């Protein structure tokens, strides 16, 4: 990251960051009129004009400085101070491996020229700043920091504490501290430079944007994720207000600002927003010259990662291959081998997920070829070798896989700390290889401590929100790999515990947000939570410093950091113990712990069976685990994760399009065969009540869609033989006795002033595409009022509440005594994150109100409600979807209501036809009031609708299968 950002800090329009020249000792200075150079200008005039351009933010190329330096060396009358100044500026702009050596030589020569008498050389502060950059980039950050600190003192003495010159030296100090792993120091120096930039530069000066970008990086590295995103947004807003897209240098800076914001959004899980911003960055980069190849290659790679996270793997793969090709066009001395190999490594992952092992091997070797110039023990090179070992394993070359893994894991362990995600991933790959070559028990024993570390990281209330986001990807595939290893070795209890970790980070993230919000209501609890989370944040920063020290082989620094970490651990332990003792409910809210296999079996009723399928990324295949009161069984299919995802995508496409599109029966049957293999079918036949627990793409398909094939002339579905409940977590909800009759709250049919009707087969659809970020594009819901009224009548209450039309507002909902309602129903539109501009989380649409109430009840607002509901019905489109496009199912509105206190939910997986929604919800609710179990009631309602020939397209799964029952 640092090298990439050095290009905006020290090149092009930002070269002025290190400019000096004659200047008054005031914070803000106005640029004079700068005349263009003429061909026969003297060296003195060329120096004056180029210095002014550099000082006031106008770019000066290294070719211009180099040409001037040659002329000044040939002129014996050139003042030493001017010669040294030009040397410093040129050294600063020289980039790339060969040029770094030249840069260091020139900077050292400039230092020697000015070392005898600092008073005679007022630009010595700038020379030391450039020398700091040169030494830092040559792998000598210690001397680099000393030079930068000396430059700061000289700049302050000459220009004052409130000066851009001091900020410039502080920026160099920041990158030096970054290089030694002192991320708090980096954030401190970059924050100082950012503050001074805002105060000391004209509001249109591009160096302000650079200072903000550097500070955003510093905040990210110290765990201040949300602060960093805010700074990135501010930098983009500044760029849009002050930079022109038609000027190449300004367009390049603007592209970098958009790229930086998009990267932060990607890293914080805000994929829908990241996609939009990356597209803008790429549009700007497409207009730049060939010097921007590296920038565009990086942006394409990160954009591919964004699309990959939201399941659009084909598009992601194409972008990664484009990125790799662009990196190949960059001159070797200008390229970063680790960056260049990254997109090909990701493209190999996609090929492997599809089961194309030969193509994946080819891509793995191409990536390693690109990394040949990296150090042999570079951790990213070692990680790529471990990925090769995993692919060799799947190709059947066990001996070569073991050889490659043995060498690579040594480098990983030497360079990375145990908590580093790359080490966790590498260790798990090594364990999988070991299991195949030396036996299942050997692989299990190696993987066990890794699984324990992951679990403790997610369950620890001290882990920050940023930790949970960053650990989510590695947690998913590493936990799935451990499930397979533990099952193969016969350790069912450990396998069951790890099974719950495959999506625990998602639930833990939502729980963390709710627990933190609730903690703020108690000053004592809030103070303890703040102490705990700050100590954890600092510890994470020091862990990175330890990794940097390990990489340098600096034993003294490693020991010093270890001492700091031990002190922080003591603080964390005390704060955690105090929270557990004084506020035990915080831990229960913040981290729902996995349940043991024995306890889960004891909870099961006769006839109940848990079905939990998972796909394996580190091995080819899919595993399905079943649990009954009698024990755990499992079976494995060789269908790879990519094929499973493709089947899911086909199924979703065939129902989201509505009954106008033929249902993909072949995909349904293939998915059934994969998830319910023959070995497990007897278990299902003996147990008619199915509890479904799935993650990733598998959680986006209701089990009712799975077809077991034909029985005679009839097509059979899973719903024909089983009641189905979806479980977002296997942890048991607090038991509460159900009252025989409790109040009903119905909310829906919001009043939207204007709209464009969206129709499907002549019926209004709950949901649809939101255009231009405006709620006015949503259609009315003519049957929603009647639906809610029928629910109310089905419950037979007199003191129930129904809020529709102008009354269906956020304020009206929040003013209700929500804990008194046993059944709550929403009949309205549901939105996913990103469907409306600025909407970063899913929401239910209500009637807009004057002021700040825009008519969106968001997931975070829902999670903060206090409910005591036996039953929440979300008769809204896509209410089972994740909190963000590509996020796991049930991590959005459904999880929000669970966290708010709902024990059962009825949610949908795709846009629902208005008449079908009303029919299923009302019939289900009616049956439950006669004592029918919710799952059985939903099944009866679905089957009745499917068989009712009076309903248009009654037998198409898009009509009868969208709803699922979610219960804990």
Image (cartoon, grey):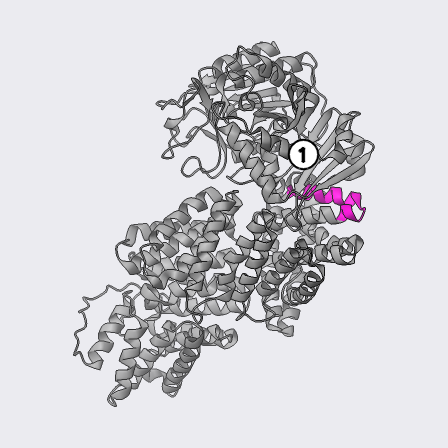
Q: Nearer the viewer, residue 460 or 880?
A: 880
Query: Residue 788 lies in magenta, yes or no?
Result: no
Residue 108 in the figure: left or right of residue 813:
left
Q: Nearer the viewer, residue 11 or 849?
A: 11
Number of residues whose C-alpha sits closer than 10 Å to that of mark 1, classed few (under 14), some (14–19) or many (20 or more): some
Q: Is residue 284 left or right of residue 101?
A: left
Rendered residue at 76%/39% (across/down): 634
Q: Residue 488 colored magenta?
A: yes
Looking at the rendered structure, the number of numbered marks drawn on it comes to 1
**Does residue 910 lie above or below 437 as drawn?**
above
Identify which residue is drawn at 53% across, 24% down: 958
What residue is rendered at 67% in x and 60% in y?
418
* Residue hosting label 1: 673
| x then y, percent, for residue 769 | 42, 31
x, y percentage for residue 526?
Answer: 59, 44
- Visible residue check, residue 389: yes
> Left or right of 347: which side holds 967?
right
**Quadrant of the rendered image containing residue 695:** top right
- Residue 807 at x, y percent in the picture: 45, 19
User: Which residue does the image show at 59% across and 50% down from the upper left?
Assistant: 356
Secondary structure under tag 1 reads: helix
Q: Is residue 683 above or below residue 120?
A: above
**What is the magenta segment's predominant secondary structure?**
helix
Where in the figure is residue 905, as x and y percent of width and height? 61, 26
Q: Is residue 611 left or right of residue 957?
A: right
Quarter in which the C terminus is drawn: top right
Magenta segment boundaries in residue numbering: 486-504
Q: Is residue 626 above or below residue 714?
A: below
């Amino acid at each position: 990251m640092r090298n990439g950002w050095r290009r905006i800090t020290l090149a092009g329009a930002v070269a002025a960051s290190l400019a000096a020249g004659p200047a008054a000792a005031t914070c803000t200075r106005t640029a004079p009129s700068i005349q263009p150079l003429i061909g026969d200008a003297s060296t003195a005039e060329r120096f004056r004009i180029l210095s002014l351009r550099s000082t006031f933010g106008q770019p000066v190329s290294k070719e211009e400085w180099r040409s001037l330096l040659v002329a000044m060396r040939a002129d014996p009358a050139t003042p030493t101070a001017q010669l040294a100044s030009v040397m410093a500026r040129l050294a600063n702009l020289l980039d790339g491996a060969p040029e770094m050596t030249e840069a260091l030589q020139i900077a050292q020569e400039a230092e020697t020229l000015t070392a005898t008498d600092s008073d005679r050389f007022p630009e010595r502060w700038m020379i030391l700043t450039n020398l700091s950059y040169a030494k830092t980039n040559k792998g000598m950050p210690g001397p680099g920091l000393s030079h930068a600190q000396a430059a700061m003192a000289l700049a302050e003495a000459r220009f004052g504490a409130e000066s851009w010159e001091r900020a410039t030296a502080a920026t160099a100090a920041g990158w030096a501290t970054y290089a030694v792993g002192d991320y708090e120091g980096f954030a401190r120096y970059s924050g100082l430079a950012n503050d001074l930039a805002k105060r000391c530069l004209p509001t249109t000066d591009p160096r302000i944007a650079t200072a903000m970008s550097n500070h955003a990086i510093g905040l990210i590295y110290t765990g201040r994720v949300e602060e960093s995103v805010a700074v990135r947004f501010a930098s983009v807003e500044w760029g849009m207000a002050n930079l022109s897209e038609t000027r190449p240098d300004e367009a390049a800076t603007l592209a970098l600002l958009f790229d930086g914001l998009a990267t932060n959004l990607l890293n914080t899980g805000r994929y829908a927003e990241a996609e939009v911003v990356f597209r803008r960055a790429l549009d700007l980069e497409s207009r730049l010259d060939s010097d921007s190849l590296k920038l565009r290659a990086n942006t394409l790679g990160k954009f591919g990662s964004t699309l990959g996270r939201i399941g659009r793997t084909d598009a992601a793969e194409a972008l990664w291959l484009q990125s790799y090709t662009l990196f190949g066009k960059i001159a070797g001395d200008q390229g970063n081998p680790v960056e260049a190999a990254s997109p090909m490594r990701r493209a190999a992952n996609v090929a492997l997920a599809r089961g194309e092992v030969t193509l994946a091997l080819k891509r793995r070797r191409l990536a390693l070829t690109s990394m040949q110039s990296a150090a042999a023990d570079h951790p990213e090179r070692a990680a790529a070798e471990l990925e090769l070992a995993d692919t060799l394993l799947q190709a059947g070359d066990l001996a070569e896989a073991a050889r490659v893994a043995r060498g690579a894991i040594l480098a990983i362990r030497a360079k990375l700390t145990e908590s580093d995600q790359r080490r966790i991933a590498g260790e798990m790959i090594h364990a999988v290889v070991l299991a195949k070559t030396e036996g299942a028990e050997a692989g299990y024993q190696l993987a066990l401590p890794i699984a324990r570390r992951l679990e403790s990281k997610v369950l620890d209330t001290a882990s920050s929100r940023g930790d949970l986001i960053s650990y989510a990807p590695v947690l998913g595939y590493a936990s799935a790999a451990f499930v397979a290893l533990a099952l193969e070795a016969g350790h069912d209890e450990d396998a069951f515990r790890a099974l719950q970790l495959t999506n625990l980070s998602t639930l833990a993230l939502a729980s963390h947000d709710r627990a933190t919000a609730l903690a703020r209501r108690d000053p004592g609890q809030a103070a303890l939570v703040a102490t705990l989370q700050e100590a954890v944040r600092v510890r994470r920063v020091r862990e990175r410093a330890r990794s940097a020290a390990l990489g340098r082989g600096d034993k003294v620094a490693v020991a010093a950091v270890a001492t700091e970490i031990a002190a922080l651990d003591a603080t964390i332990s005390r704060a955690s113990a105090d929270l557990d003792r004084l506020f035990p409910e915080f831990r229960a809210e913040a981290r729902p712990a996995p349940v043991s296999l024995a306890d889960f079996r004891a909870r099961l009723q006769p006839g109940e069976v848990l079905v939990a399928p998972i796909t394996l990324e580190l091995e080819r295949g899919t595993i399905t685990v079943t649990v009954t009161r009698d024990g755990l069984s499992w079976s494995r299919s060789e269908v790879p994760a990519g094929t499973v995802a493709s089947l899911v995508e086909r199924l979703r496409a065939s129902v989201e399009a509505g009954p106008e599109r033929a249902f993909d029966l072949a995909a349904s049957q293939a998915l059934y065969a994969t998830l319910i293999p023959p070995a497990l079918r007897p278990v299902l036949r003996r147990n008619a009540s199915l509890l479904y627990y799935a993650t990733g793409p598998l959680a986006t398909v209701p089990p009712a869609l799975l077809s077991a094939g034909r029985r005679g002339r009839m097509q059979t579905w899973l719903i024909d033989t089983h009641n189905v409940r979806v479980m977002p977590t296997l942890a048991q909800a607090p038991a509460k006795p159900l009252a025989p009759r409790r109040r009903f709250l119905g909310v829906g049919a919001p009043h939207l002033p204007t709209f464009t009707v969206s129709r499907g087969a002549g019926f209004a659809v709950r949901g649809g595409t939101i255009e231009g970020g405006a709620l006015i594009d949503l259609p009315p819901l003519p049957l929603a009022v009647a639906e809610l009224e029928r629910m109310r009548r089905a419950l037979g209450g007199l003191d129930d509440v129904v809020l529709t039309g102008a009354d269906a507002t956020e304020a009206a909902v929040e003013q209700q005594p929500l804990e008194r309602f046993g059944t709550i129903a929403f009949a309205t539109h549901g939105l996913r994150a990103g469907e409306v501009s600025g909407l970063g989380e899913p929401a239910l649409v209500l009637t807009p109100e004057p002021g700040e109430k825009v008519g969106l009840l968001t997931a975070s607002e829902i999670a903060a409600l206090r409910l005591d509901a036996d039953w929440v019905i979300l008769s809204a489109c896509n209410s089972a979807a994740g909190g963000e496009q590509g996020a796991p199912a049930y991590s959005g509105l459904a999880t929000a209501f669970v966290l708010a206190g709902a024990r059962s939910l009825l949610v949908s997986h795709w846009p629902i036809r208005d008449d079908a929604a009303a029919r299923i919800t009302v019939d289900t609710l009616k049956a439950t009031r006669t004592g029918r179990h919710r799952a059985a009631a939903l099944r009866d309602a679905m089957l009745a609708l499917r068989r009712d020939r009076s309903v248009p397209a009654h037998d198409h799964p898009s009509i009868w299968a969208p709803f699922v029952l979610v219960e804990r």
